[in-house]
Image (cartoon, rainbow, N blue to C red):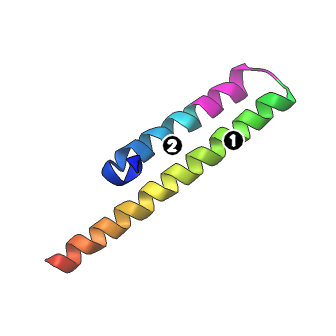
Amino acid sequence: MLFNKNKEIMLTIGLFSLTIAILLDRFAGVGTIIDFFCGLLTGISLTMNLGYLIRLRIERNLEIKQK
């Protein structure tokens, strides 16, 4: 998979999706579809950022054990 090769892509996707969700919430107005996309992008952001942090922690623990 793409995320196995470069975990920073996960962080980038998470940050951009949160940024887009915040901008939609601020400037797009009120509507059901806008709320749906804000929730969807916020969920993607949470998933990607937590996945990045978990992978970072696992890699650091492996580095410590190898030393």
* Residue ID at (56%, 53%): 47
The picture places residue 27, in percent across and down from the top left corner, at 70, 20
The picture places residue 59, in percent across and down from the top left corner, at 30, 66
SS of the residue under disc 1: helix
* Residue ID at (43%, 55%): 52
- Name, please, the residue furthest toward the front: 1
The picture places residue 51, in percent across and down from the top left corner, at 48, 57
User: Is residue 21 rendered magenta in the image?
Assistant: yes
User: Which residue type does callout 2 highlight?
Assistant: Gly
SS of the residue under disc 2: helix
User: Which residue type does callout 1 highlight?
Assistant: Leu
Q: What are the residue bounds of the magenta stretch?
A: 20-29
The disc at residue 40 is 1
Main SS, magenta residues = helix
* Residue ID at (36%, 50%): 7
User: Is residue 8 rendered magenta in the image?
Assistant: no
Residue for badge 2: 14
Quadrant in the picture for residue 42? top right
The span from disc 2 to disc 1 (Cα, nearest Å) is 12 Å
Residue 55 to residue 6: above or below: below
- Horizontal side of 41 relative to 19 (left or right) equals right
Viewer-nearest residue: 66 or 3: 3
Circles 2, 1 touching at the beta carbon (< 8 Å)? no
* Residue ID at (36%, 46%): 8
Viewer-nearest residue: 19 or 36: 36
- Horizontal side of 12 relative to 23 (left or right) equals left
Report the quarter where the C terminus lies. Answer: bottom left
Residue 66 to residue 29: above or below: below
Residue 32 to residue 53: above or below: above
The picture places residue 26, in percent across and down from the top left corner, at 70, 25
| Count of labels in the image | 2
